[in-house]
Amino acid sequence: MPSVTWGVVQGKKEKLVNRVKICDYLKTLGIIPDELENLELPSTVEVMSERVQFLQKLGLTIDDINEYPLMLGCSVRKNMIPVLGYLEKVGIPKSKLGEFVKNYPQVLHTSVVVEVAPVIKFLRGLDVEKQDIGYVLQKYPELLGFKLEGTMSTSVAYLVSIGVSPRDIGPMVTQYPYFLGMRVGTVIKPLVDYLVSLGLPKKILARMLEKRAYIVGYDLEETVKLNVDCLISFGIRREAIASVIAQYPQILGLPLKAKLSSLQYFFNLKLKIDPDGFACIIEKMPQIASLNQHVIMKPIEFLLGRGLPLEDVAIMVMKCPQLVALRVELMKKSYYYFKSEMGRPVKELVEFPEYFTYSLECRIKPRYTKLQSKGIRCSLNWFLNCSDQRFEERLQGDYIESESLGPSFCMGGKLELPGSDVVSDEEDESDDEVLYRRTVSL
């Protein structure tokens, strides 16, 4: 509670007179004293003047004080200086203290020992780095008003229960401290349950939250569900929704309808890609929803400039949407190496547009050089779409094995390779424990 600075015991009449003087003084400054009616005020105008001047030196304006006039009930020496001194000690720069008080003036009423210090200790116990404490408090100052055994503890316990690693809670708090103030039963759990119902295993969801804690801040009814319905309305298969979210979790929080409408029209206009083809592109690379159309056009213009027909470029983009996110400078180098050193027909690029996604210096050149030394003639897919170990095994073989489509991915099932049994030999797991392959973007 605000401290009262009394020099002497005053009579009721004198108190009333001084209150009137103080209120008149505040009015002359433009401060509305109505909310101070039930608050004990200091004994003299001088003491109140000291409080106002102290707050103004911090950077607060009269308008800021009018937003929360109860701060004038706090003693400079007993409340303001101890609290602000401690906040500066834990990492909030002196130049930012005024802004901090402006955002959370209630902090001036708190006790350092009883309220503030225990919250700092709690944050450190969650593995929030010491140098990040000030940043976290500036981002979410309301943390200082929470009960430790209440919302903060339950939200952390719930996230750990669904698979979030305890050692990642600290970085999550630093990135998005607001989840500490969210109720599990009404905010976090309903969102988690909904995403799991779409086919996302809890393990994948836990990894998503570890890297992008702000996902729990997406409004379930107003944003997440609407965006999932939007994806389905644009032709994305319901069984592919979980994969799309796993690849690009931010898609849940975008103004998606407007973005997809614009992109669908763009791809139809520039490449004659129909709605089904557009849905295929989104399923393979949902990040495209956030790309600027100007950026997308550069790789497309490069390919068209090499004499490739429009329909072939469209096929390449549908096969490998990552093309539209590549740097044209790198595409040029890979293309000229393909034409000048390999001397292959352009139709091979149409069949395997992924060629442009591989590093020219680290994969294409070294592997092609080895193929030449061995006198092996093969497709781009055969020598690029495999690990280094697999490539060496292929080089040692006496024949060129038939090509396969690579790993297949089945929603809700385990990773399988063509012509082989299930990759994992571990004991059977529930559907919630199955990991998806396409989580590279995490």
Image (cartoon, rainbow, N blue to C red):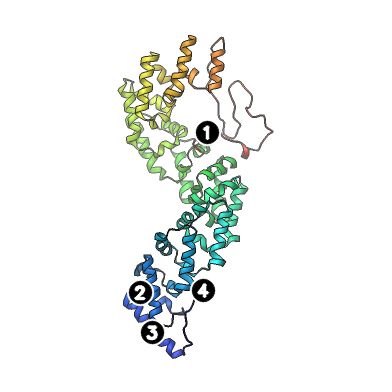
Report, in whole angstroms, how far the alpha carbon at label 2 lies from the one at label 3.
14 Å
Q: Residue furthest right?
A: 427
Kind of residue at disc 1: Arg
Q: Residue at x 52, y 17 (%)?
A: 403
Q: CA distance from mark 3 to mark 4?
A: 22 Å
Estimate the x, y position of residue 42 in percent, counting from the top left: 44, 80
Label 1 – label 3 distance at C-alpha: 70 Å
Q: Which mark is residue 31?
A: 2
Mark 3 or mark 4: whose residue is earlier in sequence: 4
Q: Position of residue 407 (x, y in %)?
A: 55, 26
Which of the two discs, 1 and 2, sits closer to the camera?
2
Q: Nearer the viewer, mark 1 or mark 4?
A: 4
Q: Residue 20: which numbered mark, if any?
A: 3
Identified at 48% across, 66% down, the residue is 83
Give the percent coordinates (x, y) of residue 134. 47, 56
Residue located beneath label 1 in the image: 438
